[in-house]
Amino acid sequence: MRDKNTPLGLYTIGIAALFLAGFLLLVILGARSYRDTVAVQRGNMETRALLSYLATTVKANDTAAAVSVERGESGDALILTDGESGYALRIYRYDGDLVEEYAAAGTPLSPEDAQVIAPTEVFRAEQTEDGLLRLTTDAGQVLLRLRSEGGGEA
């Protein structure tokens, strides 16, 4: 015959509750860790995306005398001229964003017609004496060796 006053049932329930609490704590901590890892990964991908976009755009438009840098009151503008059409892709910083616009070459910049690429507080473009194009943003810096001859700073 069993003694009804033994605390064995309470111990069993207590141990089960302890395991359940530990399991829930493990799930919560794992979910937080996963969320933080994904946020860091997303930030890294966005950083790489901006620099990769700039590098790909320059490489795609790297023809003779097509790449140039203009210095203006509002900062640097990277000009990628299409010699056949007379139009140019112009990349510059405006109102806290890196923007691009496609317009007739030689016309003034019109930021109201530009499309936002990404937010950035810094955009510098410079061509070095050894034939490199250095593009600097908040996301970092990319160095590109231009394959074509020509281009320059205005």
Image: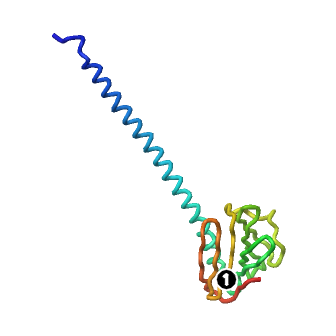
Location of residue 62 in the rendering, given as x and y in whole percent from the top left corner:
65, 81
Quarter of the figure with the C terminus: bottom right
Which residue: 69% across, 64% down?
121
Q: Is residue 97 left or right of residue 45?
A: right
State which quadrant residue 88 falls in.
bottom right
Label 1 SS: strand
Please tell me which residue lies in front, 1 or 107.
Answer: 1
Residue lying at the far right in this picture: please name it: 108
Relative to residue 72, is residue 44 depicted above or below? above
Location of residue 65 in the rendering, given as x and y in whole percent from the top left corner:
71, 86
Which residue: 43% across, 44% down?
30
Q: Is residue 100 left or right of residue 106?
A: left
Quarter of the figure with the N terminus: top left
Relative to residue 9, is residue 122 depicted above or below? below
Residue type, numbered disc 1: Gln
Location of residue 130 in the rendering, given as x and y in whole percent from the top left corner:
62, 88
Please tell me which residue lies in front, 142 or 68.
Answer: 142
Which residue: 74% across, 82% down?
84
Relative to residue 12, is residue 119 depicted above or below? below
State which quadrant residue 148 falls in.
bottom right
Location of residue 21 in the rendering, given as x and y in whole percent from the top left corner:
38, 32
Local crowd size for mark 1, using a 10 Å CA cut-off: few (<14), some (14–19), many (≥20): many
Numbered label tally: 1
Which colour assignment does the render follow? rainbow
Q: Is residue 56 left or right of residue 77?
A: left
Which residue: 68% across, 76% down?
125
Can you identify the residue that label 1 sits on? 127
Relative to residue 32, is residue 142 depicted above or below? below
